[in-house]
Image (cartoon, grey):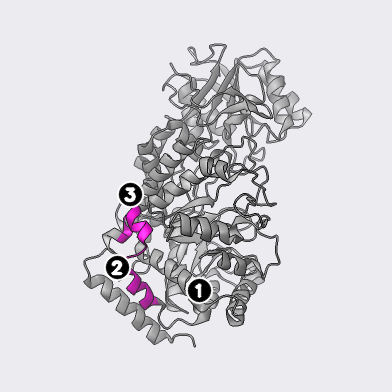
Amino acid sequence: MPMSRTSARRSLSVAIAVVASSAMVSGVSQAAVSGNPQASNRGADAAALAQAKAHMHGMSLDQKIAQLFVVSVWGKSANEAHPTNQANYGVDTPAQVIEKFGVGGVIYFNNSGTDNVDNPEQLAAFSNGLQRAAVKHNTHLPLIVAIDQEGGNVTRLESPATEFPASMAVGAGRSSADAKTVATINARELRAMGINQNFAPVADVNSNPLNPVIGARSFSSRPDLASRLVTAEIDGYQEGGRLSETVSSAAKHFPGHGDAETDSHTGLPNIDRTEAEWREFDLPPFKAAVDAGIDSIMTAHIEVPSLDPTGVPATLSKPILTGLLRNELHYRGVIVTDALGMGGANVFPPEEIPVMALEAGVDQLLMPPDLQLAIDSVKAAVESGRLTERRIDESVLRILLLKLKRGILTSPFVNEHKVDKIVGTPANVAKIQQIMDRTTTVVRNDAGLLPIADVPANVLVTGIGDTTSGLTHRSPEWLAASIDERGADATPLPTGLNPNQATIDRAVTAANGADLVVVLTNNLSGRLQQRALVNALLATGKPVVAVASQIPYDAGFVDAPTWVATYGWRANAMESLTKVLFGEVSPKGTLPVDIPTGDDPNTVLYPFGTGLTW
């Protein structure tokens, strides 16, 4: 039977009293909350385990199963009615979702399909509202509140929150100290908004230049550099401040998504590495994450026949998750799936996927497309004997230990009145800008165009950009504004990701009247019209600076005499680019990957470590 509200509160109060009376941090000893590998590999200490078991004592099977799930909700406040909540969950508001199902966590998004984000103060109030719903109903356990705030292209919280560089930009900067600072500031801001788990850093080694989904989300194509920066960011997320300023970090996507040629959002990538190659290239950053005491590791929806010849996705593979991650690497933290609605996961019937994931060794089930079906399927598997309740208990204990370790169980709420003093502060923004200024990479400067000695009268800034002038992809406008501040007259002319011939012609006409052209690119590999745009601008004879504004591999597809890589297209990346163009800072970034010639990954045009300066 479900625990009564009175007994649940009594259990929670007893556990909190134990915490308050002990010489521990939020109920877990310093050894257990530290990021040292010994603490991680031996698992939780006895006191923390006892407290987690006290929380679990008396929970019904239904309540324990619900703790395994992390779900998305629709709306921007706990009590906002949204039709998608009704369609997906049979209730109107996010709070009612929590009250009905008693899930262990939620995840925020800022896209049009699941838009939870308005501003930092709103998000703090939203988090508090969800936590109130959680602690007043069902198990009375506070929520894990998660987000994908990687930086760069995967940025869920935009300005006025601080925006962070892409991992590959951090890789170009090479600095472990900067990586830790990025994660420390990110964690502090997230926690102020009530978010206590960040699905970052990306530990994938982007060894395939044509990877359609990782790219600049990865630190590097070199496992040693990726490992070093993964470790530094974990330290920043989990140990960068007081417990109330840290978040759980999640290395992703095990066993390594860096060699994929298919986007796992839409299909199941097949990674044809040998096991020896996997151990050389993909394994090191994840081993480093385990050694650093990472709280959680996210699985990949990829097929790796050399590690599991059955053909099931790694998310559902016992040889990969239990055999390698648990038994070989001795990982004792939480294993969380990537979103279960992605194409790479949906290769079995929907009722099979959550059960197979638990059989493989997963603890947290992220965003099942049908939550009620998933819950019912897990319960039916326990009732039939396919899964044991002891197996469910193992995962629930790991989740509760994570909640204890981060202080979530004892301090789930945030001060909504202090958000603006913590999130997006001038000091935070300035510090991240300084770090960004150390990442811009000058790949080629054959014409000696850079740095620009004399401020040009007229500058055309064209290329990628949202032609509807929405908030996202306004790179030409942001760059033009930065250039204007240096005394030039810069005109933004966004052409979108796939410009047609009429758009290219307009850009060429504008270029003919300019003294300097800056063209921003994004993934020339699959976008032939962008290549045509750059080549048409070069044909005008005007000075042209080509900028790979997300993945640096663009420099291999067009023979421009001046190439710069920024690894991101947000306003702070455009500001750093402007400083480099006008010689205000010397470029310090060096390529964290090899750039091949066009579509031939075997011919390196610009090798790892390339980076011109002055």
Describe the element under mark 3 as helix, strand or loop: loop
Could you tell me the amino acid type at mark 3? Gly
Residue denoted by label 1: 392
Residue denoted by label 2: 27
Could you tell me the amino acid type at mark 2? Gly
Lower sequence index among marks 1 and 3: 3
The local crowd at label 2, few if under 14, some if 14 to 19, many if 20 or more residues have their Cα within 10 Å, is many
Magenta-span inclusion, residue 168: no
Which mark lies nearer to you, 2 or 3? 2
Q: Considering the image in quadrants, where does the C terminus appear?
A: top left
Does the CB distance between marks 1 and 3 fall below 8 Å? no
Residue denoted by label 3: 240
Pick the residue in front: 204 or 201. 204
Which secondary structure type mostly characterizes the magenta part of the structure?
helix
Which mark lies nearer to you, 2 or 1? 1
The part of the image, by quadrant, that contains residue 96 is bottom right
The local crowd at label 3, few if under 14, some if 14 to 19, many if 20 or more residues have their Cα within 10 Å, is many
Magenta-span inclusion, residue 39: yes
State how many labels appear: 3
Residue at mark 1 to residue at mark 3: CA–CA distance: 32 Å
Highlighted magenta segment, given as a residue range: 32-55
Residue drawn 49% across and 71% down?
Answer: 67
Could you tell me the amino acid type at mark 1? Ile
Does the CB distance between marks 2 and 3 fall below 8 Å? no
Q: Is residue 300 among the parts visible in the rendering? A: yes
Relative image position of residue 68 (x, y in whole percent): 51, 69
Picture layout, residue 567 above or below residue 402: above
